[in-house]
Amino acid sequence: MARFSCFYLAVVVCLCVFLVPCCAVEISAEISNTAPQARTKADNVSIILSSLLEGYDKRIRPNYGGDPLPVNISMYVYSMGPVSEAQMQYTMDLYFRQLWTDERLKFPGDIVDELSLNSEMVDKLWVPDTYFVNEKSAKFHDVIYKNTLIRIRQNGDILYSTRLTVTASCPMNLAFFPMDQQRCSLKMESYAYSDKNVHYYWMPNSPINVDPAVTLPQFQFLGNSHRINLEVYYVGNYSQLIADFYLGREISYYLIQTYMPSTLIVIVSWVSFWIPRSSTPARTALGITTVLTMTTLMGNAGSSLPKLSYVKAIDIFLGMCYFFVFAALLEFALVSYYEKPRFKEARRKLKESREIGNHSTVSKSTGSPCSVYSVDKKHNEIEITFVNEDAVKSSSYSSSDMNRGAARRSSYIRAAERGSPQAKPMRRLPQRETHNNMSKCEEICGPSCASFGEIGIDPGAVDQRSRKAFPFVFLVLNIAYWGYYITVTSGGVDDLIAEVMNQS
C-alpha cells in the first residue's frame, strides 16, 4: 500500500509541474492581447481629439456668418442662502449647464459615441461668454480639481457643466415685512455676442431644478419659474434668460421675538389703571419702563433691515403698541394733574351745590327754603331729612354738626295698611339773586370753580373708563391689522408668477 501511495503522489506532482506553466502561458497571452486593444482604443481617441483640434480656431463662434447660434441652458440648485435684506442680495450654489452645437467637432461614432473630458479641454474650445447680469460676486470651485466637465458627442453637440457659487442682487419690497413674499431673479446673457450671433433658450423639460432638501433659516422656498427676455442696450439687443425663485418669509420668528413681547408690554402698561393714584412712584416707574422697553424693541426690529423710505407692516404694529404705552403714561399725567388739592376741593364744593340745588324745597311751617339732606327707607317707613338753607348760611355749622341735628328737622311718614305712601312732589326753588347776578354754584363755590377748566375732571372716572377703552380699542386695531395683512399676503406662488408675467 505504501508503494501505491508514493506512486500516486509522484503522478500528481508531475501533472502540476507540467500544467501550471501551460496556464500561465495562456493567461499572459490573453493579457498581451487585451493591452494592445486598450492602447489601440486610447490611441484612437487621442487621434480623434488631435484631428478635431487640428485647424480649430476657438476665437470664432460656431456657424459664424450664418444664423444665430442657439445655446440651451439649464441649472440644478443644490443650496440656497443666506438671504440678506440689509444688502438686498442672496447666495446660491448650482450646477450650471450649457448645450450648443459645434459642427467643427463632429467625429465618426464607430469607436466612441461621446467624449467625456475635463477642464483641460475647455481652454481649447469655443464656449459661450455667458455672464450673470445681477451678479455681485461668483466663484468657480477648484477643490480638489476644477469642477468642470465637457462632453462632445459625435454629432457636434457640446455639453459644458460647471459648479458655481453666485451672490446676486435681489431688490425686495419690504412693505409687508415680515409677512412678505420675495422674488429673487438670476439673469444671464452673452457679454460680447448680440442676438444676431447668439440666442439663449431654456432646455425643455424642467430647465430649473431645485434640491428638495434646500432650506433657509427665515424663508420657505415656494417655487421657481423661468422667462426669456430681449434686453436693449446702446451697443445692440441681447438675448437674456431669467430664472425666478420665490421665497415666503416665516413669521414664527417675529411672532416670538417682536409681536408677542410688544403685545405683553402694552398689557402690562394697563396695570397702572388699577394702581392707586396716590402711588405716584409706582405708576411713574411702570409707565416709563414700558415706554423705554417699546423703544428698544422698535430699534431691534429694524436693526437687520435697510434704511427704507416707506413704512413696513411691523413698523405699523410697533408704532401702534408704542402709542398705547405712551397714552397710558399720559393718562397718569392727566389724572395726577387733576388730583391736586384745589381741584379736589372745587369738585367737592360743586358736588354739594348740585345736591342742594336738585333737592331744594320749601318748608311748610316757616316758608324758608329747605333742601333734602337725606332719604332713608326702612321697611315700611321713609325718613326724609330737610336742611334749612337760611340756617346753614347764618350759622357756622359743619356737615358733621348737621349730621348731629343742627338746623335740621325730620319728618316721618309711616306707611299704612292701605299701601305705600305717595311721595309729595318737590319743586326746585328759583335761584336766589345776588347783587352780582351770580349763580348758585358761583355763590357757594366761588367764581373760580364754576367753569369746567378750573373744576377739572374726575380722575377716578378717567381710570375706570381707561380700563375698558384701552383694551377694546387695542383689540379692534389688532383685528383690523391682522385681517388686512393676512388677506393681502395669502396668495400662493401661482399668483406671484402671474404677476411677474403681467409685468413682463
Image (cartoon, helix red, strand yellow):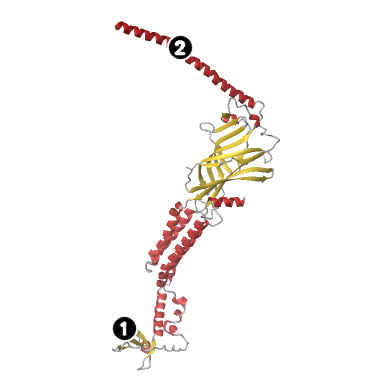
Q: Nearer the viewer, residue 105 or 461?
A: 105
Left or right placement of residue 65 versus residue 249 in this view: right
Q: Give the crowd class for mark 1: few <14, some 14-19, many >=20 residues within 10 Å.
A: few
Residue 432 on image: x %, y %: 44, 89
The disc labelled 2 sits on which kind of residue? Cys
SS class, disc 2 = helix
Residue 10 on image: x %, y %: 36, 7
Residue 121's quadrant in the figure? top right
Residue 339 at least partly seen: no
The disc label shown at residue 339, or none:
none
Residue sticking out furthest to the right:
65
Which residue in the structure is indicated by mark 1?
Answer: 377
| Count of numbered circles in the view | 2
The disc labelled 1 sits on which kind of residue? Lys
Question: Distance of mark 2 from mark 1, alpha carbons?
Answer: 138 Å
Residue 299 on image: x %, y %: 48, 55
Circle 2 or circle 1, nearest the eye: 2
Does 87 sit above or below residue 321?
above
Q: Residue at x 44, y 60 (%)?
A: 291
Q: Nearer the viewer, residue 393 or 216?
A: 216
Which residue in the structure is indicated by mark 2?
Answer: 22
Residue sticking out furthest to the top:
3
SS class, disc 1 = strand
Does 407 sit above or below residue 460?
below
Residue 181 at least partly seen: yes
